[in-house]
Every structure is written in C-alpha cells, then in structure tokens.
Image (cartoon, helix red, strand yellow):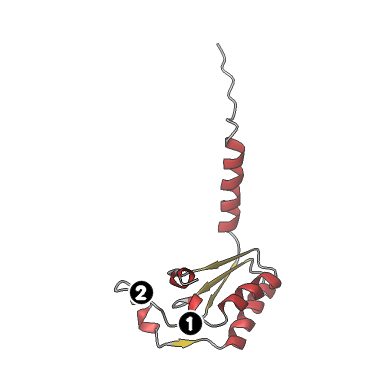
Amino acid sequence: MATEERASPAAAPVDAKVSQHEDAAHQKRNWVRLTFDCNDHCVFCLDAHTHDGTNRDRAEVRAQILDGRRKGAERLILSGGEPTIHPSFVDFVRLGRLAGYERIQTVTNGRMFAYG
C-alpha cells in the first residue's frame, strides 16, 4: 500500500522563514563601530581593553556607512563598545535606512532601550 506524503499546512511558512535566514546569512555586511565606551563593565567583556570613553566622529561614521553601501553591503551592523550611547545612534540607523540597507542590526546590551 503506497502512502502519499503531504507537507503540513505550517511547513510552507517555516520553509520560507528558513530560506530567508539562509539568504540573510550570506548578505554582505558593513560592521561600523560607533564607540569606544560602554555603560556596562562586564567582567567577561572581550572588548574592554579598547574602551577609552570616546565616541567616533559623526562625519567619519557617516562616511563609513555610505561607503559600505556603495561597495554593495546589504546589512549594516552598528557596534561598539556600546553603540546606543553614541549621541547620533538614531541618526545612523536612519541614514542606514535611507542609504538602502536591507537590514540594520546593532550589537547592544540593550540598557539604553530600558530608559525610555
């Protein structure tokens, strides 16, 4: 007796989601460091030796964001130190969107989002 295999109704959305993640994993990335500072002092931080309390120059960061997009990067990753403490963080996210990045990510401890 032959059995017929059918995909479950939920399989199609799952397959599409897996495909999206695989595509995203192969996107060209532009990593942009915004700060050499952090609002946490984690004992396990591998980046602590670079923290001198400074933020990168706004014009320099802006140029790096735009240059990465011109070179074909599809994903912008804003990092630090802690990128959300840069006074122009939101402006950099906005610039990334206007420049045409498909995805914008940040590597953050998330504390600034809790301060509302």
Is 4 in front, or is 91?
Answer: 91
Q: In which quarter of the view is residue 9 placed?
A: top right
Farthest top residue?
1
Q: Quadrant of residue 57?
A: bottom right
What residue sits 29% from the left and 74% below the top?
A: 43
**Outermost residue, front side:** 116
Question: Which amino acid does the dot numbered 2 rest on?
Answer: Leu
How packed mark 2 is, by other alpha carbons closer than 10 Å (few <14, some 14-19, many 20 or more), is: few
Q: Position of residue 112 (x, y in %)?
A: 47, 73
Compared with 9, 55 (above or below) is below
Q: Nearer the viewer, mark 1 or mark 2?
A: 1
How far is disc 1 from disc 2 in space, using C-alphas?
Answer: 15 Å
Residue 10 to residue 97: above or below: above
- Checking the image for residue 35, the label placed there is 1
Amino acid at pointer 1: Thr
Element at label 2: loop
Q: Is residue 29 left or right of residue 38?
A: right
Q: Which residue is mark 2?
A: 46
Residue depicted at x 54% and y 83% = 87
Name the residue at 63% across, 75% down. 68
Instruction: Depth check: give the residue in front, 36 or 115.
Output: 115
* N-terminal label among 1 and 2: 1
- Residue 53 drawn at (x, y percent): 42, 87
Tell me the quadrant of the picture where the N terminus can be found. top right
The part of the image, by quadrant, that contains residue 12 is top right
Determine the residue located farthest toward the left in the rendered image: 43
Q: Are marks 1 and 2 in contact (CB under 8 Å)?
A: no
Q: Residues within 10 Å of mark 1 (few under 14, many from 20)?
A: many
Instruction: Identify whether 14 is placed above or below 36.
Output: above
Identify the disc placed on residue 104. Answer: none
In the rendered image, residue 105, in percent from the top left (x then y), is placed at: 55, 66
- Which residue is depicted at the point 32% across and 73% down? 42
